[in-house]
Amino acid sequence: MAIGASRIYHVNANCSDLNRSLAFYESLGLTPVVHTRPSRPQPGGAFGLDQVAWDAWVLEGDDGPNGLSLDLLQWTVPPPGGRPPVTPWHPGLHHLVVSVPDLEAQLAAALAAGGSLVGGPVVGDHGGGEAIRAAMVRDPDGTAVVLVWGPDARITRVVVNTANLGAAVAYYRDLCGLAVLGTWDDVHRPGELYGLDGRVELRVADLVDVGAGFTVTLVQWVTPFASVTSDRRVRAPNELGLYRLAWATDDCSRDEVTVRAAGGVPFAPTAELSVGDDLPLLKVLFWPGPEGECLELIEVTEDSGALS
């Protein structure tokens, strides 16, 4: 049985300097819309921490609140630590894909805003024979972002690396309620996109969140062969890089029962968090997904409002 969530709400990226990272993501065409900054530390049991505090902006693409938002967050308690994945096959949440109307211009803007080029632009198979031109960059903290051409600026997908594509597809389909668009066992791309020599071979599955039209792409690396199992772990909430993928729901406690029945182990029972003194308290639930990625439920009702 799937959670009763209506749609994927946002993806979270942790940064070490909010203003610096804000400038980078604005250079890609994303717009800050809501500032969340609780005025004092609060109990952090929902994250598995004692106390938490942060400063964050929620950014939207040209699709506005109907699309996927980016929760760009700088931790203050505890301070940010760690680093984003270095290898392209690192398990869990790995990179965002952002469409931009002018690939060359946006790439130049991203590099001028503190980003660094990993590889590209190059043309490669995205799955199902679809050839796209793409470039991979890293934000100022090292979080990977792939830029592709599109009619407007928006986050189109998040990529999750997995050691077992079939099991990951079943998890995101059966528990998270995503619809499978397709799976491909022999996707080939230029290694240059990932900063590698030669070509890479991947197994890929695309799953769509019908509520937001947003895609979660699951990737199992074949060549170069990489055993992600040795790297799999639950990342700390304050580690730099992509950390959470959040769904909106009308009842966190109900969906917590579903998560636990499927074998999920939340960091804590459904809890309330303040996201700002002038914003309503939100009910939330966090638990690790199949590759250690943090998955989140946010209860969004008429009383709680929305963050975007």
Image (cartoon, rainbow, N blue to C red):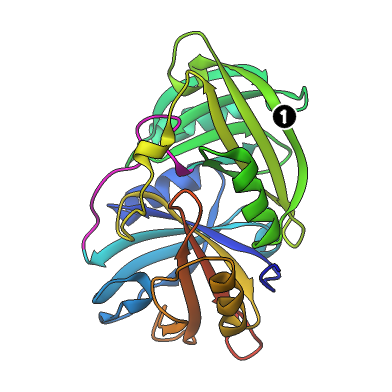
Relative to residue 240, is residue 299 drawn left or right?
Answer: right
Q: Position of residue 270 (x, y in %)?
A: 47, 82
Q: Mark 1 points at which residue?
A: 184
Snapshot quadrant of residue 67: bottom right
**233 inside magenta stretch:** no
Relative to residue 145, is residue 238 drawn left or right?
Answer: left
Q: Is residue 232 visible?
A: yes
Q: Where is residue 157 in the image (x, y as percent from the top left)?
A: 62, 45
Q: Is residue 156 visible?
A: no
Residue at figure coordinates x 44%, y 40% from the top left: 91
Q: Where is residue 248 in the image (x, y as percent from the top left)?
A: 62, 71
Task: Classify mark 1: residues with Cα within 10 Å, few (<14), some (14-19) or many (20+).
Answer: some
**82 inside magenta stretch:** yes
Name of the residue lying farthest toward the top:
198
Query: Which residue is at the front of the view, 133 or 243?
Result: 243
Q: Start and end of the magenta stretch?
A: 79-93
SS at badge 1: strand
Is residue 279 shown above or below 1? below
Q: Position of residue 141 (x, y in %)?
A: 32, 42
Residue at figure coordinates x 56%, y 39% from the top left: 164
